[in-house]
Amino acid sequence: MLSSRPESPGVMGSGVAILALAALLAGCQHAPPAEPPSGPTWVNQLGMVFVQVPAGTFQMGGVPPIETLARTYPLLETKRFTDLFDEAPAHEVNISQSFYLGQHEVTVGQFQRFVEASGYRPESEADGTGGYGYNPRYDPATTRRGDAFEGRAPQYSWRNPGFAQGADHPVVNITWNDAQALARWLSHTEGYTYRLPTEAEWEYACRAGTHTLYPQGNNPQSLVQVANTFDQEAAPLWPRWQQHALEGSDGHAFTAPVGSYTPNAFGLHDMLGNAWEWVADWHEDGYYATSPRNDPQGPAEGSVRVRRGGSWHTWSFYARCGYRNWNTPQTRYPLVGMRLVREMALPPGARPGPSP
């Protein structure tokens, strides 16, 4: 809901998570790599559908003039616009190779199958501190940070964000380290390389050839028809921010089943809204000024990881293609999920095997 604000690091750091994952992989039987896909989509062993995103060049980042932003978002104060300096400058980026990107965000059901098959314990459970969740009796005004959700608390996790979810909803309360664990397990069991998208790959896929604030244009109100963001369904639950809700209803007060809205030109659903999506990169305010043109990977080091795309609880201003948010790798929150890349080529030395 609010501007970038990292959560305090959890008890279990990334080093512990990686060691735990290495231990469970050591005891996991390696399945043969799957056959290369013959078409533009690919379905893996967890039922995740992947869409082929073509190589290409696009303009990444860039901040519209303050006057334009003020006209587009008249209820917001100027400081919210001047805080967008990390989106500048606009710069040309070349994505040199096509890749497979999840057609949808990873779902509750898919993540549950991963947990059951691998024995992995997500950080919200492993470190004992839980996550955040919706509680209608919780009042943000009574807390020091004014956070929209209650937590951290052990009763909240990816299994329980405080609201009902079906198996086809995006999994949330997932840390960056949890996303890495899923990608490593899939890579190990299928042979192909799975990973989080880079920030550049994510924005390229979100824009899908467009140059506007949103893939469908510059009008924030257009999100109601194509994305699950903060609108009149969710607004009554948070009177404090009700004035920032879009007019109309997208049909869901909380998360929606993935694929509920029209895909973009690349065939990808929910690139904006439903759940924030972790990407691979560390965040650095000035990175765009020195970013390489070809396949940027983000800063070499940092303290917070980037997340993109907005969520079911995100104001339209923050659910733009170019908006950059960030949190610690241990953050778990009922707005944050993930979407994975599967690289096209087999790693060196790997042999194709039967389909999963």
Image: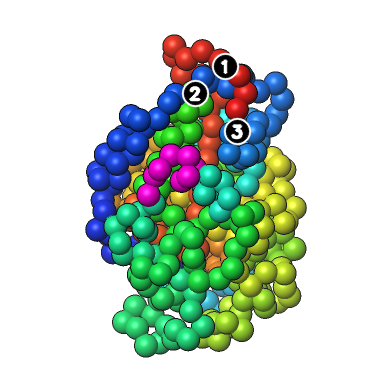
| Residue 280 visible here | no
* Residue 223 figure quarter: bottom right
How many marks overall? 3
In the rendered structure, which disc, 1 or 3, sits on the residue that comes first in sequence? 3
State if disc 3 and disc 2 touch (CB < 8 Å): no
Q: Is residue 113 magenta?
A: no
Q: Nearer the viewer, residue 37 or 201?
A: 37
Q: At 36% across and 71% down in the image, what residue appears?
A: 153
Question: Which residue position holds label 2?
Answer: 31
State the residue at coordinates (59%, 68%).
164
Question: In the rendered structure, does residue 117 fall within the stretch colored magenta?
Answer: yes
Specify which label sits upstream in the sequence, 2 or 1: 2
- Residue type of the residue flagged with mark 2: Ala
Disc 3 residue crowd, few under 14, some 14–19, many 20+, Cα 10 Å:
some
Which amino acid is tagged 3? Asn
Q: Earlier in the sequence, mark 2 or mark 3?
A: 2
**Residue at 65 percent of width and 23 percent of height:** 37
In this picture, residue 355 sits left or right of residue 339: right
Q: Which residues are magenta?
A: 114-121
In the picture, the disc for residue 19 is none
Residue carrying label 1: 353
The residue beneath circle 3 is 44
Could you tell whether 30 is left or right of 313 in the image?
A: left
Q: Is residue 45 left or right of residue 293?
A: right
Q: Residues within 10 Å of mark 2 (few under 14, many from 20)?
A: few
Q: In the rendered structure, are the residues bearing label 2 and label 1 in contact, judged by CB atoms less than 8 Å apart? A: yes
User: SS of the residue at dot 3?
Assistant: loop
